[in-house]
């Protein structure tokens, strides 16, 4: 990716399209509305709260990220989306039970004004759900065209200058890339034939790319992570990013594992279990959807700890992840980790974590940051996979032949250096020997 000669200004309205208007999407929209009205701070959002050091430590230049790079502001955002249920955003947020009813009552007119458009959906891919708000069409191609019409009419209706799309829909069943996913030509034939290896989230991704709209995947299912759509995005000049928002237990894992590894402490086993009772938990109760999530959650330790480089410390590490659907807990997930570590001469120790988190409270700021950075990437003329945004994802998309970078701190350094590079500032290596000349 070259430094752009110019970054198009962030003028006018930015439309954020959300396939899946459940707990995460409604917490995001209501949160942005609340912040606009002075009803809370966008905590957890790097674009809104973060700063970036520029130049030497002696220069004292650390502007807020949003003042350093030309990002759309919260006041420029407008929202639309699709869901298989007809509830407007206010009612869906009440149902999700994440935000307090008093807050939602204050935002009611804005939230009630947004109702989901009929979804592209098939129960084969999300076994635990069924709803009435679903498009009809002879094949995937017709359904993709209908999404294209929705996108065009929202762009007009919402007066949007630019759009981004972020999949906040349920986790689909486990699928692996197959022949129909290899080339755009083959994929488009599959759309016309309603090939079962194409899932609804792929149809949304295709429709977005076709319309020239940057696309992100917040769930672990394949969606755009297939050669046909990666090539399509590259050729169409569209930025792509994914997969699976990095929140909760995996966030903790990618904070802690690099620290243990930095001190060359060994790990014998890492057992993670969760209880959660929201709709996401219900969907993940289906073994086929859980398998998609499990793969995403399991991959992080292997890449961070590099057992092939450090066999004495991490070879044979036993890593287990469980998710248990437990309705009384709603969105307030509880995640337990037991980590069996060892130190000097192999002496064993244990770490226990009990994280009483709020899933969608952690995910909402990621949706905001991803929307704003994807739009920045598009205005900078960047295309295809945006690996510098790995910071936000459990299973970062990456170029073929590379391994994904999971270490949160390397990811943050990469993100900030990318912003410095974009704006023509020097990248920071933290070498710092010039201070001692
Ligand atoms: N909350 C988190 O911390 C977190 C973290 C990582 C990933 N995720 C993923 O984000 C997604 C959303 O999570 P959530 O908690 O909002 O779940 P949710 O169940 O509350 O919302 C998902 C919504 O998607 C809708 N949906 C399903 N298939 C659809 C389709 N084909 N088209 C349109 N709508 C569709 C469902 O009806 C539901 O309303 C899930 O896949 C989840 O695994 C969430």
Image: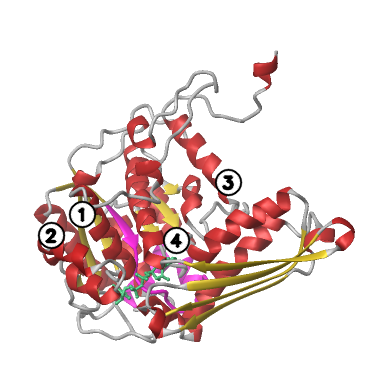
Mark closer to the observer (4, 3) = 3
- Its colouring scheme is secondary structure
- CB at disc 1 and ligand 1 closer than 8 Å: no
**Which residue is tagged 4?**
245
Q: Count neighbours of disc 2 (C-alpha within 10 A) and say few if under 14, some if 14 to 19, many if 20 or more.
A: some
Q: Residue at x 24, y 46 (%)?
A: 74
Q: Count neighbours of disc 4 (C-alpha within 10 A) and say few if under 14, some if 14 to 19, many if 20 or more.
A: many
- x and y percentages locating residue 388 in the rendered image: 49, 45
Q: CA distance from mark 4 to mark 2?
A: 26 Å
Report the image quarter containing ligand 1.
bottom left
Q: CA distance from mark 1 to mark 4?
A: 21 Å
Q: Secondary structure at mark 1?
A: helix
Q: Residue at x 48, y 26 (%)?
A: 54
Mark closer to the observer (1, 4) = 1
Q: Which residues are magenta?
A: 164-193
Q: Earlier in the sequence, mark 1 or mark 2?
A: 1
Q: Earlier in the sequence, mark 1 or mark 4?
A: 1
**Of residues 376 and 203, which is closer to you in this image?**
376
Tag of residue 110:
2
Q: Count neighbours of disc 1 (C-alpha within 10 A) and say few if under 14, some if 14 to 19, many if 20 or more.
A: many
- x and y percentages locating residue 185 in the rendered image: 40, 63
Kindly give the residue lying farthest to the top in the view shown: 437
Tag of residue 409:
3
Tag of residue 33:
1
Q: Earlier in the sequence, mark 3 or mark 2?
A: 2
- x and y percentages locating residue 286 in the rendered image: 46, 86
Q: CA distance from mark 3 to mark 2?
A: 37 Å
**Of residues 154 and 250, which is closer to you in this image?**
250
Q: Earlier in the sequence, mark 4 or mark 3?
A: 4
- CB at disc 3 and ligand 1 closer than 8 Å: no
Q: CA distance from mark 1 to mark 3?
A: 30 Å
């Amino acid at each position: 990716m070259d430094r752009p000669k110019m970054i198009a200004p962030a003028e006018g309205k930015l439309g954020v399209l959300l396939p899946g208007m459940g707990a995460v999407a409604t917490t995001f929209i209501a949160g942005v509305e609340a912040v606009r009205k002075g009803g809370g701070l966008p905590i957890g959002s790097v674009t809104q709260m973060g700063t970036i050091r520029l130049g030497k430590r002696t220069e004292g230049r650390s502007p807020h990220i949003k003042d350093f790079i030309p990002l759309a502001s919260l006041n420029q955002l407008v929202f639309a989306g699709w869901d298989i249920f007809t509830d407007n955003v206010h009612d869906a947020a009440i149902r999700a039970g994440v935000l307090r009813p008093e807050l939602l009552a204050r935002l009611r007119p804005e939230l009630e004004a947004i109702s989901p458009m009929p979804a592209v959906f098939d129960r084969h891919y999300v076994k635990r759900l069924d709803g009435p708000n679903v498009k009809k069409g002879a094949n995937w191609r017709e359904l993709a065209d209908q999404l294209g019409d929705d996108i065009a009419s929202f762009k007009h209706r919402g007066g949007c200058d630019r759009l981004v799309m972020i999949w906040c829909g349920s986790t689909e069943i486990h699928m692996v890339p197959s022949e129909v996913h290899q080339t755009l030509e083959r994929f488009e034939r599959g759309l016309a034939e309603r090939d079962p290896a194409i899932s609804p989230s792929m149809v949304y991704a295709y429709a977005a790319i076709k319309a020239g709209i940057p696309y992100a995947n917040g769930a672990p299912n394949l969606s755009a992570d297939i050669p046909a759509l990666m090539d399509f995005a590259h050729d169409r000049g569209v930025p792509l990013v994914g997969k699976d928002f990095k929140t909760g237990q995996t966030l903790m894992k990618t904070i802690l594992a690099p620290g243990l590894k930095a001190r060359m402490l060994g790990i014998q086993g890492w057992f993670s279990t969760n209880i959660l009772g929201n709709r996401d938990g219900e969907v993940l109760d289906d073994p086929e959807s859980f398998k998609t999530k499990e793969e995403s959650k399991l991959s992080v330790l292997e890449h961070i700890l590099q057992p092939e480089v450090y066999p004495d410390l991490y070879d044979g590490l036993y890593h287990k992840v469980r998710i248990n659907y437990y309705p009384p807990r709603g969105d307030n997930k509880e995640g337990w980790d037991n980590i069996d570590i060892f130190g000097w001469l192999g002496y064993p120790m244990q770490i226990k974590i009990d994280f009483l988190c709020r899933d969608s409270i952690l995910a909402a700021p990621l949706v905001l940051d991803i929307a704003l950075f994807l739009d920045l990437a598009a205005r900078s003329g960047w295309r295809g996979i945006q690996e510098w945004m790995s910071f936000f994802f459990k299973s970062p998309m990456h170029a073929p032949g590379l391994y994904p970078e999971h270490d949160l701190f390397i990811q943050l350094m990469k993100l900030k250096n990318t912003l410095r590079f974009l704006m023509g500032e020097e990248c920071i290596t933290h070498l710092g020997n010039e201070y001692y000349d």
